[in-house]
Amino acid sequence: MRAPDLHSPQGLSPTLLGVVPYAGIKFFTYQSLKALWQGPLRSIGADSAPVKPPLYWSLLCGGAAGLVGQTATYPLDIVRRRMQVEGGEAAQIGAARTSVIEHLCSLSRSGLRGMFKGLTVNYLRIVPQTAIGFTTYDAAKTALGLKNHL
C-alpha cells in the first residue's frame, strides 16, 4: 500500500475554481436583493438617504444569496468530493487520477439530476448559515460605522 501524496491534495482545483464564483454570486445576490428594499421607498418620494432594511429582510436576502450561490457552483462541489475519494483510492492502488475537466464531463453526461444530486440537503446547511452570516456582517458594519462599505 502506497502512502498518499500530500503535496497535491485531490479536490483542491475544483475547490479553488468554485470559491471565487460562489463568493461573487453570493455577494452580488445579497446586495441586489437588499437594494430592492430601497426601490419602493425611492419611488414614493422618500428622501435619498438609505433606509436600513428590517432584520427579517436581511435574513431573507442572506438565505436567498446562499441558495443562489450554492446552486450555481454545486457541480464543482460534487467534483471536489469525487476527486477527494478517488485520490485516496488511486493512491492506494497506484492508479491514474482523473482531472477536473474529465469529472465535469462525466457529471454532465448524467444530466441535471446527477449534477445537482444532494443539493437540497446542502440547502439545509448553507441557507441558514449564509442568512445569519450576512445579517451579522451588516450588524457589525453598522456597529463600526462602516455604512458606505460593501
Image (tube, grey):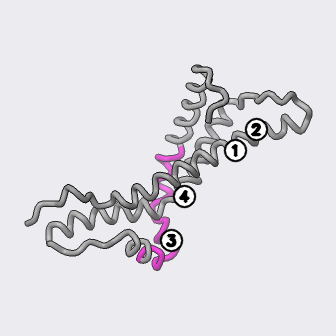
Picture quarter with the C terminus: top right
The type of residue carrying mark 2 is Trp
Residue range corresponding to the magenta coloring: 106-127
Task: Decide which of tag 2 and tag 3 comes sooner along the chain.
Answer: 2
**Left or right of 129: which side holds 88?**
left
Rendering quarter of residue 7: bottom left
Q: Nearer the viewer, mark 3 or mark 1?
A: 1
The residue at which mark 4 appears reads as 71
Magenta region's main secondary structure?
Answer: helix
The residue at which mark 3 appears reads as 113
Task: Decide which of tag 3 and tag 4 comes sooner along the chain.
Answer: 4
Q: Residue at x 33, y 60 (%)?
A: 11
* Rendered image: mark on residue 99: none
Q: Nearer the viewer, mark 3 or mark 4?
A: 4
Picture quarter with the N terminus: bottom left
Mark 1–mark 4 CB contact (< 8 Å): no
Q: Is residue 12 above or below residue 136?
A: below
The residue at which mark 2 appears reads as 37
Q: CA distance from mark 4 to mark 2?
A: 24 Å
**Left or right of 38: which side holds 98?**
left
- Label 3 element class: helix
Q: Is residue 73 above or below residue 35?
A: below
Q: Which residue is at the far bottom? A: 109
Q: Residue at x 58, y 52 (%)?
A: 25
The residue at which mark 1 appears reads as 33
Q: CA distance from mark 2 to mark 3?
A: 35 Å
Task: Decide which of tag 3 and tag 1 comes sooner along the chain.
Answer: 1
